[in-house]
Image (cartoon, helix red, strand yellow):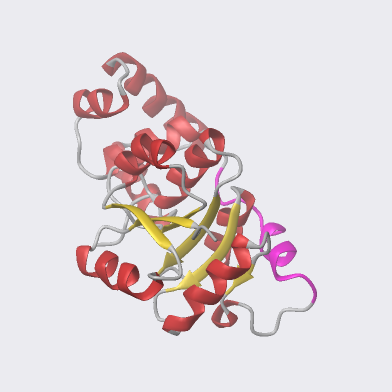
Amino acid sequence: MKRPRIILADDHTLMLDALKNLIEPEFEVVGMFGDGHTLVEQAPDLNPTVIVLDIGMPTMNGLLAGQRLKQAMPLVKLVYLTMNHDPDMAGEAFRLGASAYLLKNSAAGELLRALREVVRGGFYVTPLMTKGMNGSFIQNFKRRKSTNNLTLRQKEVLQLLAEGRSMKEVAFVLNVSPRTVAFHKYTMMEHLQIRSSAELIEYAMRSSLVPAA
C-alpha cells in the first residue's frame, strides 16, 4: 500500500528534521520548505496528500500559504503545527481550509494521530485547545469572527512590508509593479483607518500576519 505523501514547512531546520524522523516510515516526506512563498510555488509539483505547516513563516505566513495551496490543490489536507494557541487563529485556519491544528508543545504522538485522522478525511484539534468546549470543536473554531477583512493579496503585501521590505522589493517578490503595491498599501490604510506606515506594521504584528521573532 502506498504511503501518504507529506510536505513539511517550518522556518527552523532542526524542527523539519525532527518532524521527518518522527513521521517516517509511516508517511513519505516528499518535500521540506523554510518559507511560505517557496512552499506555494513548489508544492503542487510534489502532489502531496498532506501539508504540515507552521503559521509563523517568512515571506508568506502559513495562513496565507494555506489559502493559496487550497486554491491550487483543493483536495490537499492542511495540518497546522504552531506555537500560536490563540483560538481566533485556529478559527481562521479552519475557515481557510485546515484539517488539523496542533501546538508545538503537543505530545509527539499527536502529530501521527492527526495525520492518520486527516488522511481518512477527518479533522483533528489538539486537546490543549479544546478544554471546556461543547459540541463540534471545528464548528466552535469556525464560528469565531474573522480578525480582519483584508484580501489575500493585501495580506501578502502587508506581511512583506512588515518584514521591512521596500515597496520595490515587495513588488519583485509578488511579481507586480511598485505602483500596485502602493495601491494595496494605501487601500489597506484607508480600510483599517490607519494613518501611518508604523501603525500598519503594528497592525500586522497584532494580527499575527508576521511571524514572531
Q: Nearer the viewer, residue 132 or 202?
A: 132
Q: Residue at x 47, y 48 (%)?
A: 48
Residue 39, position in %: x, y?
35, 43
Q: Residue furthest front?
A: 1
Residue 24, position in %: x, y?
38, 70
* Residue 43 visible in this rendered orientation of the protein: yes
Placement of 115 over or under 205, stated as above or below: below
- Tell whether 112 sits left or right of 11: right
Q: Nearer the viewer, residue 8 or 12?
A: 8
- Tell whether 165 sits left or right of 132: left
- Tell whether 146 sits left or right of 3: right
* Residue 86 visible in this rendered orientation of the protein: no
Placement of 208 over or under 186, stated as above or below: below
Q: Residue at x 54, y 38 (%)?
A: 73
Q: Nearer the viewer, residue 24 or 62?
A: 24
Placement of 84 over or under 5, stated as above or below: below
Q: What are the residue bounds of the magenta stretch?
A: 135-148
